[in-house]
Structure formats: structure tokens, C-alpha cells
Amino acid sequence: MRIAIQGELGSNSHMAAISMLGNEVAEISIVPCNVSAEVMTRVVSRDVDAAVLPIENSLHGSVAEHYDLLLELDVLIERESLLRIRHNLIVAPGVGLSDLRRVISHPVALSQCRKFLASQPQLEVMPFYDTAGSVKYLMEQGLKDVGGIAPQLAATQYGGEVLIPAVEDHAQNFTRFHLIRRSDDPLLLPLEEPENKMSVAFAIEHRPGTLVAALEKLALAGVDLTKIESRPVPGSPWEYVFYVDVRFDTPAKAEAAIAALVEHCRMVKVLGRYRSASFTAE
């Protein structure tokens, strides 16, 4: 199974793909992509079977671009997973902390390791395009004075060495990932447990009270609203598409929720029904 991710091999998206598929698929080929739009283009064009993309981080919030892609393209969410984010200082084998002059990583990763970086004022901190990419770069260039902040898998992937593990500020740092496939494809994986969560996008008329009325209809349908996110409508200033996640205990309640929104909203798109993920330490 070919799975596209944004970022390099050894990234958190790579780890999430293994977490979601590793026990059920005999062979997984990870296809790294530069940007998320490329990831989704590969899915839609059938160059890959599916994609794994982050949708929300417990510290930094939602990935807005990915909501837009889910709405725009003919794709569905099949699964979700929650991955504990661990940042490690990774170097070339044999390099010590006193050898380092610079640390590189993705800006989000650097911002999540502020306490550690502040404790090492001798290190110049520089943003890089990707966490795993920072380790790939320092290993390919043979750099002995540069460290990268990245997942453990990046060290394994590129032959680096974890110099200092767990340099993140917060242990309770999780990212929620989606497994995304084309809408007209069958399920990639068998459904192990009944679906109990649904992601929906909807747009309402730009009038007072319409959002409140839409949310009331969801409540009357018997579903549990767990998240709401808004995104601007291109070309329509101050109008928004709303993205909601709801939990349900019977398929009938999910159907009732959709029917209620369709009756009230000018646009409704079900982005996927799937099993709610549980926390995982890896």
C-alpha cells in the first residue's frame, strides 16, 4: 500500500502511518511529499492509495490548510489516530553536546522545545523545512557541529544518534492524524469496531442566529459536538464554512444529524465517518 505524507521519511507523519497501518498491511511504501497539496494531488490522481495528514495538535491547534483540502477534494477520512509527539536532539554518531554550534528543525518543533533551547544559549537555533529533514540534511552533509530536533524514527532512518531524548517542553503533546482516501474507493482496511465519530463541513446563510440554529439541530439529533472550527469562504468576505466533529452511539443518530443540517444549511459535506482514536504512547 502506497501512503503519501507531507515531510520526509522518519517524520511524525511517517510514524502515524505505521501506527495506523503497520499491524494490518503486509507492506507499506511511504511516499514523502514537499507540501500538503502535493500529498492530496497524489491521492486524487491515484498515484498513491491514501494519505496520512495531521489535522490538529494539542498545543498548536488545527491545521487549517488540511480542512480546506478535505472540503475541496473528493476524498474521505477513513481513520484517525493520536500520536504522542516526542522531540529528540539527534546528531551524527560520536558527536557530543560540546561539539554542537547549531540546532535546526521545523519552526513548530523548535517552539515546542523552548526550555531546552534556552538552557543551551551557546547553540544557534535555525528553522528548517522539516523535523526529519533536519536529520537527513546533517547526515548527508556529514555535519559534526549541527544537531536536529526530530522523532526517534529519523535517527533510525538516516543513521543518526539520539544525543538527548525528550527535549520537548510538554509531555502532553499529541497530534491527531487522518487516514484519507478517495471517496469512490472502498474501505482500505476492515472496520474493527463500529464507527462512532463523524466530521462534517457546512455553510449557512449569512443571517443572525443561523449558526445557533444549526448547532441546536445537531443537539436535537442526539450527537455530541466535540469540535467546531471555522474557515473563511474565498470570495465571500466575512462568510465561513464550519467544520464540526460529532460523536454518536448509533448510526441512526449520525443520519439524523446529517438530515437536520441538510434541511437547514446551504451546503453540507460529510468528510468521513470513522472510529474515534484512543491515545497512544508511540
Image: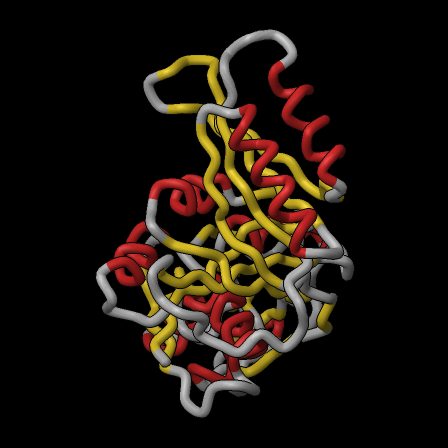
Q: Position of residue 130 (x, y in %)?
A: 43, 59
171 and 159: which is toward the camera: 171
In the displayed structure, would residue 55 be above or below residue 23?
above
Q: Position of residue 110 (x, y in %)?
A: 58, 53
Residue ID at (68%, 20%): 212
Residue ID at (57%, 40%): 258
In the displayed structure, would residue 281 be above or below residue 41?
below
Residue ID at (37%, 81%): 1
Q: Position of residue 44 (x, y in %)?
A: 27, 58
Horizontal arrangement in the rendering, residue 178 relative to residue 181 (left or right): right
133 and 42: which is toward the camera: 42
Horizontal arrangement in the rendering, residue 65 relative to residue 47 (left or right): right
Quadrant in the picture for residue 185: bottom left
Quadrant in the picture for residue 242: top right
Question: In the orientation shown, which residue stands out farthest toward the bottom?
Answer: 26
Horizontal arrangement in the rendering, residue 55 relative to residue 186 (left or right): right
Any part of residue 85 in sight: no
In the displayed structure, would residue 65 be above or below residue 165?
above
In the displayed structure, would residue 264 be above or below residue 85?
above
Quadrant in the picture for residue 116: bottom right
Residue ID at (47%, 13%): 238
